[in-house]
Amino acid sequence: MVKKTFKIDGMECPNCAMRLESIEDRLDGIRDIEANYHKGLLVVEYDEKKVSDAVISEEVARLGYRVTGVAAR
Amino acid sequence: MPNLLIAFITGLTTGGLSCLAVQGGLLASSLAGQIEKDLQASANTPQRKRKRGALQPNRPHPQLALPIVLFLAAKLAAYTVLGYFLGLLGSVFQLTPLARAVLQFAIGIFMVGSALRMLNVHPIFRYFAFEPPAFLRKRIRRAAVNGTSYFTPLFLGFLTVLIPCGVTQAMMAVAISTADPLSGAALMFAFTLGTSPVFFAVAYFATRLGAKLEKNFMRFAAIVVLALGIVTIDTGLNLAGSPVSLTRAFNALLPQPAVAQSAPSSSAAEPPGVVSALDVLGSEDEQPAVATSDIALGEDVVTIEVKNYGYEPSRVKAKAGVPLRLRLVTNKTYSCSLALVIPALNFAQVLEPTGEVFIDIPPQKQGTRMPFACSMGMFTGDIVFE
C-alpha cells in the first residue's frame, strides 16, 4: 500500500471533490481516496501492485481535471 | 399578506441568485448522484464515445428534473420549519440592531468571497464554499450507485438550512421580528418558494447550456452576487449606524429637497402646547412631506414619514441642546422601512403599517449626526442637531 497526494488543477466547485472520489468505484486496488476542493488535492491510498499513479492520473484527466504534481506521503 | 408577497418577490428576484451561489454546491452534489449514474452507464456501454471527453463534468441528462424538484421541496420544508422556530424565538427574544449589523456584515463578506471564488480570482476564496465532509460525500455516492438516489436530493435540500445565503438571513431576521411562529413559517415559505424557480431554471438548464455558456452564466451570477454582497456589507454598516456607507454617499449625491424642507424650528412666540397623539392625528391629513416642528414645553418635534420606499425627509434638522420628540407617521406602509433602527439610541421597533409613534430623544450636542435605518439597512436617514 502506498499513499500519494495528487495536486489537481481544474476543480471549480466542491462537487468536483465527489467526482474525483468516484475514481474509487472505477479502479481496482484503491483503498482510500479523499479529495479536497479547498486545497485542490486528491489523496489516494492504493495497492501499487494493482494500480499506479499514472493510471490514476489518467482517470483524473478523463474526468476533465489535470494532475499537476504527485507527491508521496 | 402584503408581507408574504414582498417575501415571495424578494425570493424571486434577489434571493434566488444569491442563494444559488451559496447553496449551489449542495444542489450540484445532489444532482451528482444522477450524473454519476449516467457516467457509469455510459462507461459500461459498448460504443464508448471517448472523443472530446465524452465524460464532461456537466453532461446533459434527461432525468434531472425530479432530483431538482425533490431538493427544492426539501429546502422549502426545511425553511418553513425554520421560519416557525424563528417566529417562536422572536416571540421570546429580539435580535439587537448591533447583532443584526454584525450578522449582515459577516454575510456580506461571505457573499463577496463566494463571488470571488466563482470568478476564480484566487484559490484562497475556495474556503468560501461549503464542502460536504468526506464521509457525507461517500454516503451520497453510495446512495446514488445503489439506486436509492431520492434520498440524496431530499437530504441535501434539507441541509441548505445550515447555509442560508445573505438575503435569506435578512428574511430570517424579518421572520424573528414577526414574533409569531405561524407568521414566521408563512414568511419563510413564501420567500423560499420565490427562490425556487431560479434554482430550478439554473440547475436544469446549466447542465444543458454547454461548458462555455455555463462558464459565462456563472460569471454573470458571480458579478450579481458580488454586487449583492457589497450591498449587504453596506446595509451592515447602515445598521451599525456608521456615518459612512455607500447608501449614504449615494443619497448625498441625489438632489434632496427634503433637506431644505426639514424641521424648521417654530418661533418661540408660538404658544406652547402639549402635543398629544390626538392633536397630531387631527392635523395629520394631507400634510406635505415636510417635517413639522412644534415647540412643546421647550421640546423640539420633528416628523418623519415612513413610506414604502424610505423615510421622508431622509435628512432632518433638529435643535441641539433640547429634548427632541421624533414623530414617525406611517400610512399603509408595508415595506421594511417599518422596522426602524436608531443605533445610537439602541432603538429598534417595528411600527404599525398605519399610525404614528413618538420617540423621545434626549438633548444632543450641536453638530451631532444621528443616523437611522430600516432593520435591513436598506433605507437610511440622519437627524442633524444644529
Image (cartoon, helix red, strand yellow):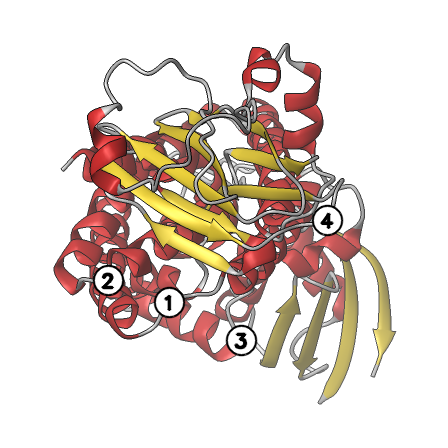
Where residue B271 sits, quadrant-wise, is top left
Q: Is residue B175 above or below residue B282?
A: below
Q: In this view, does A37 lie above or below B89?
A: above
Return the residue at label 1: B94
Q: Position of residue A13 (x, y in %)?
A: 59, 51
Of the two numbered discs 3 and 2 in the rendering, the one whose residue sits closer to the viewer: 2
Q: The N terminus of chain B appears in which quarter of the rendering?
A: top left
Q: Which amino acid does label 1 sit on?
A: Gln
Marks 4 and 2: in contact by CB < 8 Å? no
Do tags 4 and 3 sit on the same chain? yes
Q: Earlier in the sequence, mark 2 or mark 4?
A: 2
**Which labelled disc corresponds to residue B30?**
none
Marks 1 and 2: in contact by CB < 8 Å? yes
Q: In this view, does B107 lie above or below A2?
A: above
Separation (CA) of disc 1 from disc 3: 37 Å
Of the two numbered discs 1 and 3 in the rendering, the one whose residue sits closer to the viewer: 1
Of the two numbered discs 2 and 4 in the rendering, the one whose residue sits closer to the viewer: 4
Q: Which of marks 2 and 1 is nearer the N terminus?
A: 1
Where residue B273 sits, quadrant-wise, is top left
What residue sits 18% from the left and 33% below the top?
B2
Q: Which of marks 1 and 4 is nearer the N terminus?
A: 1
